[in-house]
Image: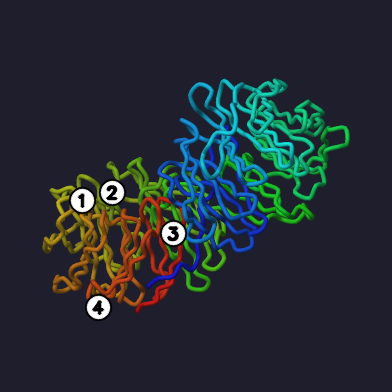
């Protein structure tokens, strides 16, 4: 069996020009955010322990703990709200179709009996409040004509609901049952977030017009405004109150700063501290989300980086939690102690991780572009995208050297390196293969079939090319030419991956028809039969350093580990390793395997063979 040892979590999904509304639970010292169809529960004192809820059928948008911390309500782009337990395997309590479109915000009532949700819909159905156990409506919500970006429940009696959105309006409702009371049009642009103070005395709205306005929570009347002196110079996307009743707030903005404000007795606000976003100052450093929880002051950047500041010591360097936002397509393990892992994702981001520590930084490729194929050796990274080019970057600690590129004339399907002399690379394309020596094309060969995967021995003397028709073509490399030796026919689907064992005595291949095969390199006999336990295409494959185990990762979300010396039926299956499919796989050592997938997360599994 296998045990989950560490999770290097994905970052929140963000969108240019929009804020994100993260939340948390002080009892468990955790925060909640969404990425794809996943809701992530991240423990601030245990960053490598992460829980993931993946039961939404559509992209999740927002999630909140109930006041007692026992339940979580999460919403998605289809207008569904799911209510599930924080313990006991996330047991589902209820599911309700709340709006006809995307839900942008939801809040629990302080007694945990009602939920209000806002977002997109048809006609008047842009805001709705309902009973958490039955879904029964608890009011009529008129007054908005466009998407409602945020809503809030007054935390004390008498209950009130306030909402704001793209129609520049702030609407105030009394109840329950809730009825429209009044509306304000004090803002001149989208109103992105509204939040009540913990004592229930006032609420604040922040807007893309760079202003924050304060209102009386009981009457809904305007009482003050955040000072423009030292104020934000960009859209304000989110706001959060200090939980200790000190009448302080934090705001975050497109101007790449977070500001701490003191709310004075007259209801106005003045800046007492400005925090600049950690980073290089690029677009990705715009701040789009924030949360003030206990002593943690949390900001989220457009690039997804979560910064944890100490509210009691704001001059202290923040703890940075970051990672991928999109599908992680490849993994590499480097070094011995500590183990270094590099991961590349679809949008072209390369992240460095340290086993036992987690996030260690992003590597700047100095070129923009997506990554399809990715290989890392001790001092070099070789990658390809969708532009017919192979990129080579020298790897110097935490820095990448200048990129050199080679145009191979066709879309690379796969690439592999000769490990003993990494300047020798083999690239397969639709029309054949290209042999590279450094940044020069040594030869290009039309093999007469559509190539789909390739592998090369560490000494560069032999290569295998997998075909779209399921055949494996074995070649000797003579100078800069490939000389075909034999063709192996066993697969019944397109070859998707090929790897030699570390001692080069065997090789393993996987196909789109869910089968993996281990071959003896010399005799070309099948070494391990009946490796047919996936239910979908095999995407990735890895050998253990001792040549004894092969792990496969599939579109079916599972990782399967086979022992070469035992029957294929005696295997370790990791079910649901990654929501959406497994795309990267590597052995750290004989006892640990690391995987990555479409859920943009990386997981380390400790193997305990039975």
Q: Nearer the viewer, residue 519 or 120?
A: 120
Do the numbered discs 3 and 1 sit on residues whose CB atoms are within 8 Å? no
Total marks shown come to 4
> Which of the marked residues, 4 or 1, is nearer the chain's N terminus?
1
- Residue at 19 percent of width and 70 percent of height: 519
Q: CA distance from mark 1 to mark 2?
A: 8 Å
Secondary-structure class at tag 4: loop
Viewer-nearest of labels 3 and 1?
1
> Picture quarter containing residue 239?
top right
> Which of the marked residues, 3 or 4, is nearer the chain's N terminus?
3
- Residue at 48 percent of width and 58 percent of height: 395
> Which of the marked residues, 3 or 1, is nearer the chain's N terminus?
3
Q: Percent from the top left, x then y, of residue 150? A: 61, 34
Q: Which mark is drawn over residue 451?
A: 1
Secondary-structure class at tag 1: strand
Return the residue at label 3: 380
Secondary-structure class at tag 2: loop
Return the residue at label 2: 413
Q: Percent from the top left, x then y, of residue 345? A: 43, 50
15 with respect to 586 (left or right): right
Do the numbered discs 1 and 2 sit on residues whose CB atoms are within 8 Å? yes
Residue 164 in view, yes or no: yes
Above or below for 253 versus 571: above
> Picture quarter containing residue 22?
top right
Q: CA distance from mark 4 to mark 1?
A: 32 Å
Return the residue at label 4: 566
> Which of the marked residues, 3 or 2, is nearer the chain's N terminus?
3
Viewer-nearest of labels 3 and 4?
4
> Which of the marked residues, 2 or 4, is nearer the chain's N terminus?
2
């Amino acid at each position: 069996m296998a045990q989950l040892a560490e999770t290097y979590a994905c970052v929140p999904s963000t969108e240019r020009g929009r804020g994100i509304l993260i939340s948390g639970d002080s009892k468990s010292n955790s925060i909640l955010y969404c990425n794809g169809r996943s809701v992530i529960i991240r423990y601030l004192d245990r960053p490598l322990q992460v829980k993931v809820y993946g039961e939404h059928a559509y992209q999740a948008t927002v999630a909140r703990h109930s006041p007692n911390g026992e339940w979580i309500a999460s919403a998605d782009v289809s207008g569904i709200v799911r209510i599930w337990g924080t313990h006991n395997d996330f047991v589902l309590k209820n599911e309700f179709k709340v709006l006809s479109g995307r839900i942008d915000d939801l809040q629990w009532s302080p007694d945990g009996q009602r939920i209000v949700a806002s977002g997109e819909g048809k006609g008047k159905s842009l805001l709705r409040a309902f009973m958490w156990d039955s879904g029964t409506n608890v009011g009529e919500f008129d007054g908005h004509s466009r998407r409602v970006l945020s809503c809030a429940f007054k935390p004390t009696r008498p209950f009130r609901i306030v909402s704001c959105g793209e129609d520049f309006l702030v609407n105030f409702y009394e109840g329950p049952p809730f009825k429209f009371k009044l509306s304000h049009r004090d803002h001149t642009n989208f109103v992105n977030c509204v939040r009540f103070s913990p004592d229930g005395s006032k609420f604040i709205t922040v807007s893309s017009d760079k202003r924050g306005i304060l209102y009386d929570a009981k009457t809904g009347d305007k009482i003050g405004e955040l000072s423009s002196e030292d104020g934000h110079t960009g859209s304000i996307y989110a706001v959060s109150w200090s939980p200790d009743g000190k009448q302080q707030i934090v705001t975050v903005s497109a101007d790449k700063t977070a500001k701490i404000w003191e709310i004075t007795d007259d209801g106005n606000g003045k800046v007492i501290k400005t925090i600049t976003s950690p980073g290089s100052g690029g677009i990705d450093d715009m701040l789009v989300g924030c949360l003030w929880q206990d002593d943690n002051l949390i900001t989220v950047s457009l690039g997804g980086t979560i910064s944890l500041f100490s509210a009691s010591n704001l001059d202290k360097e923040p703890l940075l939690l970051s990672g991928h936002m999109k599908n992680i397509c490849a993994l590499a393990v480097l070094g011995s102690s500590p183990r270094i892992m590099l991961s590349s994702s679809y949008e072209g981001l390369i992240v460095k991780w340290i086993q036992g520590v987690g996030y260690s930084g992003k590597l700047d490729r100095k070129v923009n572009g997506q990554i399809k194929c990715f290989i890392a050796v001790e001092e070099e990274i070789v990658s390809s995208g969708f532009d017919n080019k192979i990129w080579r970057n020298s790897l110097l600690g935490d820095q990448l050297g200048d990129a050199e590129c080679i145009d191979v004339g066709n879309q690379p399907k796969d690439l592999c390196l000769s490990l003993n002399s990494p300047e020798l690379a083999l690239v397969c394309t639709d029309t054949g293969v290209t042999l590279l020596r450094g940044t020069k094309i040594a030869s290009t060969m039309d093999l007469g079939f559509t190539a789909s995967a390739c592998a090369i021995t560490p000494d560069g003397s032999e290569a295998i090319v997998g075909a779209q028709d399921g055949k494996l073509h074995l070649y000797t490399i003579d100078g800069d030419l490939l000389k075909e030796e034999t063709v192996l026919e066993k697969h019944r689907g397109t070859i998707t991956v090929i790897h030699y064992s570390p001692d080069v005595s065997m090789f393993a291949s996987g196909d789109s028809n869910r089968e993996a095969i281990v071959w003896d390199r010399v005799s070309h006999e099948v070494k391990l039969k009946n490796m047919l336990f996936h239910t979908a295409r095999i995407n990735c494959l890895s050998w253990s350093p001792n040549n004894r185990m092969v792990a496969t990762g599939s579109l079916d979300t599972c990782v399967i580990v086979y022992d070469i010396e035992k029957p294929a039926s005696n295997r370790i299956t990791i079910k649901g390793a990654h929501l959406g499919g497994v795309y990267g796989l590597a052995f750290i050592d004989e006892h640990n395997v690391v995987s990555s997938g479409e859920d943009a997360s990386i997981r380390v599994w400790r193997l305990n063979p039975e």
